[in-house]
């Protein structure tokens, strides 16, 4: 009956708000209609006149379609279904006609009021069957539950600027023009700097073509200068991933544009080849430096020797040095580079031979030369010889006792596990007014931490900071990793706080190590503080961080807070491991919080489904 009521209302609306088509219908049927057998029915005449009428405006097209459909249906009922001989004016579609419309096979009998009502209900019932009304709104017109602008902002907060730019290449756009247009659109709210370009190129997993395209876009937009330093950044990223063909092509473009490569460019090329164990190609390129716009001089030789010695190709470096003696005049630094590589392996015979040739060529050994000699003897296990040579150097004053010599002695005694003896040479260094450097403190503090002498390590760390030596990010990560491998996290937190106080940058790895240790011991207050400081430092929380937070809250019994963190993790698209989810669910059930556990399990189930779908997409090479 609801559908019949709807069409009754539709008829009333049709009569009350006529459109142009109904004016034409009224005009066509204003005179009485003939009822002969050969004449068309009045309803079909109405339809013909409606079809011949001019088209309505665009605003009335929707109404016209509805009216035309109803007229066609009435025509059908008139011919087949409808058995009455007259339509009463009260239900006429033409509001301007007051005369009855006689249909086919009509006689002059007036219909009764009861028949009219029955036939009207019959027509409306048929219309309701043919045109069913959906009471459920499939496309809701209300306001969305969440603001799209706010949602997009939240999604953008999950990505760093370099990830946003790097993500353009994941979309597999067709053509460099489309890629550059997408990069320009993505960089509207991003300040593209030299460091940002370096992060995009050197991090992530871009291919060679994507790196070059991004670099050229940055140059075209004026984001970076087209100089040798900018090219070195891209060459370093290409060499790290062994894209040697792109490196050679980019080097050729440098020469065409008048940008001359420097020794850093040579180091990037040589180190990339040697790191990839393509030493022969590195030597071949070194012999043809002039073809690549670089000079074949002593500085180039030093760069090549450093690359070979740093990558443990000491024999190749030694043979190259002897071949270059006739072409380039060597100096003391060149010999020291080779001695540094030999000392790492404790090759005493080779060290003595190089020292002899060095003296024969007229170069006197300096403090750095003797430090490499002491280090090589220590690695060979000849500690007594190390002590004798150091005492002779001290007595005869053959060279200045600087930090390099003292560091060599400290390293040697630490390598054999004699920390107390190394501290004697550290105190001797201070008594000789020789300032220790970063290497000195790193070696001593690391030795203390390995021996689990935590108090001595913290005291030495305080002394290092007191002398104005700021530890690097990697150094802080190393110390925190040592301290979190055993015992409570109190000492690690002391190192962390002191490092932050002096302005040291703490890495994301160090934050994760601290969070893991704090969560294991249930230190919720410290855990949440470190988490807050991590986000203030610009790091984003991933699934690993959320697992540590949830685990720590569960260990401390803060189940409601753990559930809140779990929901936040799921909203960001992360799904913690099954172990963490099961741990939280079991603790909620044990605390008689069944409803909370059930609702959380449904959200975890959905998050797990999305995670599996994402893994499937990525396994197929799809990216969304």
Image: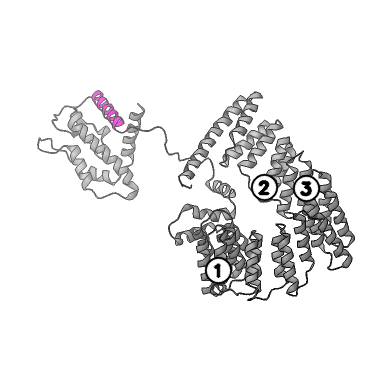
Give how far across and how far down residue 385 sits, in percent: 82, 58
Nearer the viewer's eye, disc 3 or disc 1? 1
Report the residue marked by disc 3. Answer: 495
Q: Badge 1: how crowded within 10 Å, few (<14), some, or many (20+)? A: some
Mark 2 or mark 3: which comes first in sequence?
A: 3
Res. 509 mark: 2
Categorize mark 2 by other alpha carbons within 10 Å: few (<14), some (14-19), many (20+): some
Specify the segment rendered in magenta.
107-131
Colouring chosen for the image of the structure: one colour
Quadrant of residue 530 within the rendered picture: top right
Q: Tell me the number on the disc at residue 422.
A: none
Which comes sooner in the sequence, label 2 or label 1?
Answer: 1
Magenta residues, dominant SS class: helix
Residue visible at 43% across and 39% down in the picture: 139
Of labels 3 and 1, earlier in sequence is 1
Screen quadrant of the N terminus: top left
In this rendering, position of residue 5 left or right of residue 83 = right
Q: Position of residue 523 (x, y in %)?
A: 74, 37
514 with respect to 59 (left or right): right
Q: CA distance from mark 2 to mark 1?
A: 38 Å
**Residue 405, how many percent across, how many down?**
81, 61
Q: Which residue is mark 1?
A: 285
The residue drawn where x is 51% and y is 70% is 253
Instruction: From this view, report whether residue 301 is shown above or below residue 36.
Output: below
């Amino acid at each position: 009956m609801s559908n019949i009521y709807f069409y009754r209302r539709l008829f009333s609306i049709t009569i009350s708000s006529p459109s142009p088509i109904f004016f034409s219908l009224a005009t066509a049927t204003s005179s009485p209609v003939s009822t002969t057998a050969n004449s068309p029915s009045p309803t079909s005449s109405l339809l013909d006149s409606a079809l011949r009428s001019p088209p309505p405006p665009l605003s009335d097209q929707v109404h016209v379609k509805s009216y035309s459909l109803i007229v066609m249906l009435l025509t059908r009922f008139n011919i087949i279904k409808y058995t009455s001989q007259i339509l009463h004016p009260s239900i006429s579609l033409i509001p301007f006609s007051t005369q009855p419309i006689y249909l086919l096979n009509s006689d002059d009998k007036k219909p009764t009021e009861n028949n009219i009502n029955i036939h009207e209900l019959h027509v409306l019932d048929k219309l309701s069957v043919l045109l069913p009304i959906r009471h459920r709104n499939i496309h809701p017109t209300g306001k969305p539950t969440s603001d799209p602008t706010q949602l997009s902002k939240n999604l953008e907060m999950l990505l760093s600027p370099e990830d946003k730019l790097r993500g353009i290449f994941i979309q597999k756009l067709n053509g460099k023009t489309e890629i550059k247009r997408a990069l320009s659109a993505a960089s509207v709210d991003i300040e593209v700097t030299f460091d940002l370009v370096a992060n995009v190129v050197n991090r992530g997993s871009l291919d060679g073509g994507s790196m070059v395209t991004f670099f050229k876009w940055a140059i075209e937009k004026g984001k970076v200068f087209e100089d040798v330093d900018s090219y070195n950044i891209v060459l370093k990223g290409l060499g790290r991933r062994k894209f040697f063909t792109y490196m050679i092509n980019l080097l050729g473009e440098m020469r065409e544009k008048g940008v001359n490569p420097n020794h850093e460019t040579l180091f990037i090329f040589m180190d990339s080849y040697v790191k990839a164990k393509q030493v022969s190609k590195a030597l071949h390129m070194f012999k043809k430096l002039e073809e690549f716009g670089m000079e074949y001089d002593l500085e180039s030789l030093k760069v090549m020797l450093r690359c070979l010695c740093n990558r443990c190709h000491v024999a190749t470096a030694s043979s190259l040095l002897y071949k270059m003696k006739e072409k380039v005049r060597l100096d003391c630094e060149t010999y020291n580079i080779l001695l540094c590589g030999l000392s790492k392996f404790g090759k005493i015979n080779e060290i003595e031979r190089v020292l002899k040739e060095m003296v024969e060529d007229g170069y006197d050994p300096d403090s750095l030369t003797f430090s490499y000699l002491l280090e090589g003897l220590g690695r060979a296990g000849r500690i007594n010889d190390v002590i004798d040579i150091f005492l002779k150097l001290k007595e005869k004053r053959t060279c200045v006792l600087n930090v390099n010599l003292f560091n060599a002695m400290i390293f040697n005694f630490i390598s054999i596990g004699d920390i107390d003896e190394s501290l004697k040479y550290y105190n001797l260094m201070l008594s000789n007014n020789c300032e220790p450097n970063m290497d000195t403190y790193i070696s001593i503090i690391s030795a203390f931490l390995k021996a689990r002498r935590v108090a001595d390590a913290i005291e030495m760390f305080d002394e290092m900071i007191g002398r104005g030596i700021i530890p690097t990010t990697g150094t802080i990560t190393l110390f925190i990793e040592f301290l979190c491998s055993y015992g409570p996290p109190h000492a690690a937190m002391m190192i962390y706080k002191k490092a932050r106080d002096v302005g040291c940058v703490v890495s994301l790895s160090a934050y994760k190590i601290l969070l893991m240790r704090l969560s294991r011991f249930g230190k919720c207050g410290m855990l949440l503080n470190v988490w807050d400081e991590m986000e203030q430092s610009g790091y984003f929380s991933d699934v690993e961080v959320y697992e540590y937070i949830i685990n720590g809250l569960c260990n401390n019994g803060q189940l409601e807070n753990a559930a809140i963190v779990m929901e936040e993790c799921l909203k960001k698209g992360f799904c913690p491991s099954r172990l963490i989810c099961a741990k939280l669910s079991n603790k909620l059930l044990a605390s008689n919080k069944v409803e909370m556990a059930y609702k959380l399990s449904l959200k975890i189930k959905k998050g797990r489904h999305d995670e599996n779908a994402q893994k499937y997409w990525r396994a197929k090479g799809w990216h969304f």
